[in-house]
Amino acid sequence: MRAILLVGVLGLLAAEAGAGAPRAADELRFGIEVAKKGLWQEARFRFERALVLDPQSANAYNNLGVALEQQGEFAQARQAYEKALELAGQPLRPAELRPLPGSR
């Protein structure tokens, strides 16, 4: 009886601890929202946080690359993009490549 009660209490504690914990997807969503507002330092922080929570996220690496590029960190951006491609398991097709607005 004690063992069952202890397991039940531990299960509730674990569920409560996980309920408020940030998820990688939440960090990505928030990062995208602040990036749309031009808040690149905050976006970068959120994408890096997403990678702490999910180190295998190709989307987080790709978004981090965008934020780094916007901050002028081109070498780091390239590394992030390369990692995103490695994790995605497939190269981008030419149809998916689009120039940035204002670039030629």
Image (spheres, grey):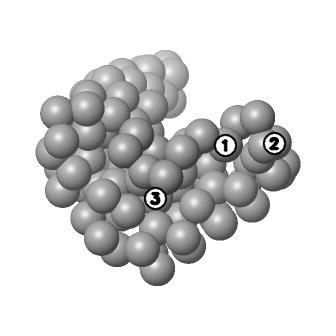
Amino acid type for the residue under numbered disc 2: Arg
Q: Position of residue 11 (x, y in %)?
A: 43, 26
In the rendered structure, find residue 65 and report the number of the disc placed on it: 3
Q: Nearer the viewer, mark 1 or mark 3?
A: 1
Disc 3 secondary structure class: helix
Q: Nearer the viewer, residue 24 or 11?
A: 24
Q: Which residue is mark 2?
A: 93
- C-alpha separation, residue under disc 2 versus residue under disc 3: 18 Å
Q: Is residue 36 left or right of residue 55?
A: left
How many numbered marks are there? 3
Picture residue at 26% right of the left edge, 64% below the top: 71
Q: Is residue 65 visible?
A: yes
Q: Which residue is mark 1?
A: 97
Disc 1 secondary structure class: loop
Toward which corner of the image does residue 41 lie, by quadrant?
A: bottom left
Picture residue at 32% right of the left edge, 24% below the top: 19
Q: Position of residue 62 (x, y in %)?
A: 53, 51
Q: Position of residue 5 (x, y in %)?
A: 42, 21
Q: Nearer the viewer, mark 2 or mark 3?
A: 2
- C-alpha separation, residue under disc 1 versus residue under disc 3: 15 Å
Toward which corner of the image does residue 38 lie, by quadrant?
A: top left
